[in-house]
Image (cartoon, helix red, strand yellow):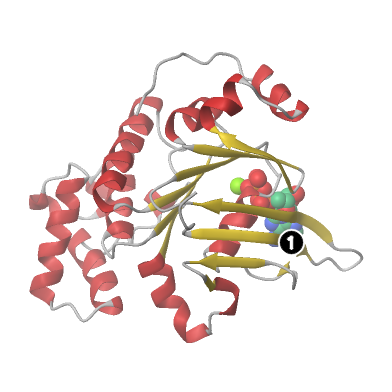
Amino acid sequence: MKTPLLSVRNLTIDYIGDNRDFRAVDDVSFDVAPGEVFGLAGESGCGKSTIAFAVSRLHKPPALIRRQSKILLNGRDVLDLAPRELAAFRWREVAMVFQSAMNSLNPVLRIEDQFHDVLTTHTAMTKAKARERAAEMLRLVDISPDRLRDYPHQFSGGMRQRIVIAICLALDPKLVIMDEPTTALDVVVQREILQRINDLRRTFGFSVLFITHDLGLMVQFCDRIGIMLAGRLVEVNAAEAIFRTPSHDYTKKLWSSFPSLHGGALL
Ligand SMILES: Nc1ncnc2c1ncn2[C@@H]1O[C@H](COP(=O)(O)OP(=O)(O)O)[C@@H](O)[C@H]1O
Ligand SMILES: [Mg+2]
């Protein structure tokens, strides 16, 4: 592999309890190459979101990242970042899109102002430049820049999700973490959005850490996939190989519990 963009090493995360601690992530290591889409799959509760939050430094107590853990982004340990470095890190290096992201827009602010807040807080961009950038980003997600002065409620759920993605990409992050980013949307809209993200990835060259419980979507969208079971990463392989020749029993079981996978690449 090329020098990885993201290297996760021995990541171990406990949720600290009153009586005993719960190990949610157990000695997980993986790499994500520049421009790669890396998927994390596994059933609910296996630790996927806990990893996503740690990589974006959004984890909070009771989550405790154990000392042996390393999360290197471009060689720098994300876990060593000082609090004052975090805001810039989160927008400019790593951006995170959540399942409920479409509800993360501020309902009382015009789309233009939400772009403006992000762009002028984290860069020295002027208001005019920020507006230009916002228009450019909206166009990239197939929304007319005429709509910059509209409010979130004037858009459909799928459009709101695309707007959130456009805002996330406006600062050109190197890694985009998507935790069930389209689960709340219908299947057609879901695929349109993933298609769009894939086009944008080819244009901008960012990497994606993609989390979903939808294995069909995962195989179509990811270059490589890591399969998680109860906090452990039990198998990592090319998406195609994970599907055709799963090596771990659990991966085989995951597939057999998955009703139908229509062939043919979506992306
Ligand atoms: N704030 C919390 N306090 C205690 N346990 C938690 C907390 N958040 C998650 N967990 C536990 O950690 C495990 C992993 O959760 P999570 O990372 O959300 O899984 P996934 O995203 O794969 O569904 C689960 O067993 C969950 O119950
Ligand atoms: Mg989750």
- From the top left corner, tell me how far across and down residue 108 is, in percent: 28, 63
Question: Which amino acid type corresponds to the residue marked 1 in the rendered image?
Answer: Thr
- From the top left corner, tell me how far across and down residue 85 is, in percent: 45, 82
Q: How many C-alpha atoms fall within 10 Å of the one at disc 1: few (<14), some, or many (≥20)?
A: many
Q: Residue at x 50, y 32 (%)?
A: 218
In the displayed structure image, the side of residue 207 where residue 48 appears, left or right: right
> Residue 78 versus residue 47: which sits nearer the camera?
78
- From the top left corner, tell me how far across and down residue 239 is, in percent: 53, 31
Q: Is residue 168 visible?
A: yes
| Quadrant of residue 181 within the rendered picture | top left
> Residue 138 versus residue 160: which sits nearer the camera?
138
Residue with the mark numbered 1: 12
- From the top left corner, tell me how far across and down residue 219 is, in percent: 50, 29
Q: Residue furthest right?
A: 19
Under circle 1, the secondary element is strand
Q: Residue at x 58, y 23 (%)?
A: 243
In the rendered view, tell whether residue 6 sits above or below residue 130.
Answer: above
Q: Residue at x 46, y 67 (%)?
A: 74
Q: Is residue 149 visible?
A: no
Q: Quadrant of the C terminus?
A: top left
In the rendered view, tell whether residue 91 sits above or below residue 238.
Answer: below
Q: Residue at x 26, y 65 (%)?
A: 114
| Quadrant of residue 54 within the rendered picture | bottom right
> Residue 213 versus residue 28: which sits nearer the camera?
28
In the displayed structure image, the side of residue 87 where residue 16 appears, left or right: right
Question: Within 8 Å of ligand 1, the CB of disc 1?
Answer: no
